[in-house]
């Protein structure tokens, strides 16, 4: 036997250097295990360069991790667990060569760039240390300043957005303008969206988690001041328009209206828009390239 595994060395240390008595080979494993292996010692042949030798008769291949080989090539014998029982090896023992074990141990001793597993995940301890340092670094004011998510930068962006829209911005407005990460940064810093607007000094719409009637009317007022007319339904279906307004469905549900013309007439009455500027939308026929009518549209309210 060339080299003993760690199990045999452990038995030697426990018995003051003497090996336990040889066990007779059971009849059920005669013809299965190579006769060169001594049953009962829990030992395998190991080559420093090739690794552990497979104990199955007429196989004898060398692998640094023998478990996968036993499970794939010798599944009829029970795989690695079956061979361990035949060889009197504890089921919890790892069939890994000494050289491979040293490479794996280098990863867990603070040298993540040396070893087999360093190409994938360094180690659980190294990952934990890295995550802790990353979290603490991102929590500093300097890191937040570099990522444009410090408290002062968030407040200035919200104030600039209010000046651009002409009203208090909603979370949907901020997501369209700055992206979804900005709204998440505001909630992490201030606790909630309404809390952020209250601390900054912007107008807060109470008892409203999404859009309320006041927010919808303020958005339509800003659109009227910019374009001189209320938006038509096609504009409300657009995701990006300046100034930003709620969607078509949101406006109808918030104002509790069944049609777009009724909703715009209600908004015009609230905003005191002259009646002469609010006209019924004129239907226009939409034609396909083949000359077939495919539907109708409407002109913007307030235009002829």
Image (cartoon, grey):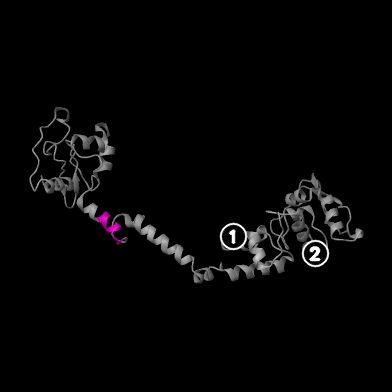
Does residue 106 appear in this view? yes
> Magenta segment: does it hold 4?
no
| Residue drawn where x is 35% and y is 59% of the image | 126
List x then y, in percent, for residue 138: 48, 65
- Identify the mark at residue 191; answer none if there is no mark: 1
Horizontal arrangement in the rendering, residue 210 relative to residue 51 (left or right): right
Q: Which mark is nearer the camera, 1 or 2?
A: 1
Whether 112 is drawn above or below 148: the answer is above
Q: Find the distance from the CA under tag 1 to the CA under tag 2.
A: 36 Å
Does residue 176 appear in this view? no
**Which element type, helix, strand or loop, lies under badge 1?**
loop
| Residue drawn where x is 41% and y is 64% of the image | 133
Q: Quadrant of the N terminus?
A: top left
Viewer-side residue, 227 vs 161: 161
List x then y, in percent, for residue 229: 83, 61
Q: Quadrant of the C terminus?
A: bottom right
**Which element type, helix, strand or loop, lies under badge 2?**
helix
Q: Which residues are magenta?
A: 103-111
Category of crowding for the residue at label 2, using alpha-carbon neighbours closer than 10 angstroms: few (below 14), some (14–19), many (at least 20): few
Horizontal arrangement in the rendering, residue 195 relative to residue 270 (left or right): left
Q: Earlier in the sequence, mark 1 or mark 2?
A: 1
> Magenta segment: does it hold 109?
yes
Q: Quadrant of residue 102?
A: bottom left
Residue that carries the numbered disc 2 in the rendered image: 227
Q: Main secondary structure of the magenta part?
A: helix
Viewer-side residue, 89 vs 139: 139
- Identify the mark at residue 90; answer none if there is no mark: none
Whether 27 is drawn above or below 258: the answer is above
């Amino acid at each position: 036997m060339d080299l003993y595994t760690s199990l045999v060395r452990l038995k030697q240390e426990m018995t003051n250097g003497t090996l336990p008595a040889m066990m007779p080979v059971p009849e059920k494993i005669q013809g299965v295990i190579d006769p060169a292996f001594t049953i009962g010692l829990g030992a395998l042949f190991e080559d420093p360069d090739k690794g552990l030798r497979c104990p199955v008769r007429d196989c004898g291949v060398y692998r640094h991790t023998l478990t996968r080989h036993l499970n794939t090539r010798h599944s009829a014998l029970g795989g690695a667990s079956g061979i361990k029982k035949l060889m009197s090896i504890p089921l919890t023992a790892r069939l890994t060569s000494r050289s491979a074990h040293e490479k794996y141990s280098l990863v867990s001793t603070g040298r993540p760039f040396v070893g087999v597993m360093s190409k994938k995940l360094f180690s659980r301890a190294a990952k934990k240390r890295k995550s802790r340092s990353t979290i603490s670094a991102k929590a500093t004011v300097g890191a937040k300043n570099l990522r444009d998510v410090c408290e002062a930068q968030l407040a200035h962006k919200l104030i600039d957005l209010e000046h651009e829209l002409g009203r208090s911005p909603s979370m949907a407005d901020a997501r369209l303008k700055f992206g979804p990460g900005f709204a998440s940064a505001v909630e992490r810093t201030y606790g909630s969206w309404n809390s952020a607007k209250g601390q900054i000094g912007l107008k807060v719409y109470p008892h409203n988690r999404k859009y309320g009637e006041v927010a919808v009317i303020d958005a339509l007022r800003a659109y009227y001041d910019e374009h001189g007319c209320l938006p038509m339904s096609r504009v409300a279906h657009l995701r990006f328009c300046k100034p930003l307004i709620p969607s078509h469905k949101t406006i109808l549900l918030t104002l509790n209206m069944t049609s777009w013309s009724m909703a715009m007439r209600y908004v015009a009455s609230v905003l005191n828009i002259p009646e002469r500027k609010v006209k019924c939308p004129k239907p226009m026929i939409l034609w396909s390239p083949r000359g077939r009518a495919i539907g109708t549209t409407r002109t913007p309210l307030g235009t002829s």
